[in-house]
Image (tube, helix red, strand yellow):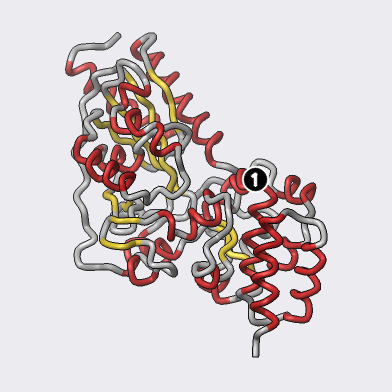
Amino acid sequence: MASAPHHLAQLAIQIKQFGMALGFQQVGITDTDLTASETHLMQWLKEGRQGDMDWMVRHADKRIQPDRLLENTIRIISVRLDYLPADCQQMEAVLSRQDKAYISRYALGRDYHKLMRRRLQKLAQHIEQQVGAFGYRAFVDSAPVMEKPLAEKAGLGWIGKHTNLLNKQAGSWFFLGEIYTDLPLPIDKPAQKHCGDCQTCMDICPTRAITAPYQLDARLCISYLTIEHKGAIPLELRPLIGNRVYGCDDCQIYCPWNRFADHTGETDFHPRHHLDDIALLEIFAWDEATFLQKTEGSAIRRIGYERWSRNIAVALGNCRSHKEKIIPALEAKRRNTTELVKEHIDWALEKIRHLV
């Protein structure tokens, strides 16, 4: 195994070069010290801002101490991969059409987890060819990993006021992945913050989930409500969700730094089944078998058919057109669905019937 400083420096260069050759847009290396992020995380959890994401509490220690997640870890290789497709419908246009379904851009194509994990595994195998057997494990949003603070420390970007990672040359439309390793590689300089006085993300957030700069209350966040939250969506937040049926991108859409974002060259991330421009009534008509077929290999499938139907019912209740088609569709679904979905259908029906 390479151990001399000049060998490790050369290895770090090779890791970045090979990572880029694999299709990652950037590769950085950092240590495991997350002391600066620990206070923020523990206060966030103390205030209950994680909502019902109980796993955030259960594994907090592994999140802030990487060597507790993987023993002997002393370095993290952090990578980013662009995902914004060039050939999808304009986001603002879809959001302005109340009869259309807005789906977060990251979920339009195939699930990114397997694609990135395979590439990280190839990167690790390349390292092994250079140094012999070494300790490592690859992660892609699949374990208690503080991926954004680690990426910031590795120089991939800075955590913006909306709590997403931002890069001066690439905006924020990218995925993150990590390799935990026991190799004592040289580390990169952390990124500096460049949000300045801008608070566009805070002003544009439909539910005011960004309660202060760098402070996100998940309980108010549409992405949390439509993806992670398993129960009923709070009544006061349903009108604010609009036509967003899976996730929310508003804080990214309007961020000035995303003027510099590059489109992805990954065909796997291109929209499937016209999900970038599809009618609410069309996807509401899907039965569970159709949902499973249309979301095969997609991140959307993880929320299940019940939450999918719940979210669309809310969006239909917020629609001000096609009342004559929406009411029968809601009534038909209500006859054969769960109590959770019925509650949201009833809300939607009451709201539509009281339209002037």
Q: Is residue 75 left or right of residue 333?
A: left
Q: Is residue 91 visible?
A: no
Give the x, y percent position of residue 52. 47, 46
Q: Which residue is mark 1?
A: 301
Give the x, y percent position of residue 11. 28, 21
Establish if 195 lies above or below 41.
Answer: below
The residue at the point 63 percent across, 45 percent down is: 298
The residue at the point 53 percent across, 37 percent down is: 113
The residue at the point 31 percent across, 28 percent down is: 76
Secondary-structure class at tag 1: helix
The residue at the point 70 percent across, 56 percent down is: 339
What amino acid is labelled 1 in the image?
Answer: Arg
Establish if 335 lies above or below 149.
Answer: below
Give the x, y percent position of residue 231. 58, 53
In this rendered view, identify the residue nearer to me: 280 or 336. 336
Q: Residues within 10 Å of mark 1 (few under 14, many from 20)?
A: some
Establish if 115 lies above or below 195.
Answer: above
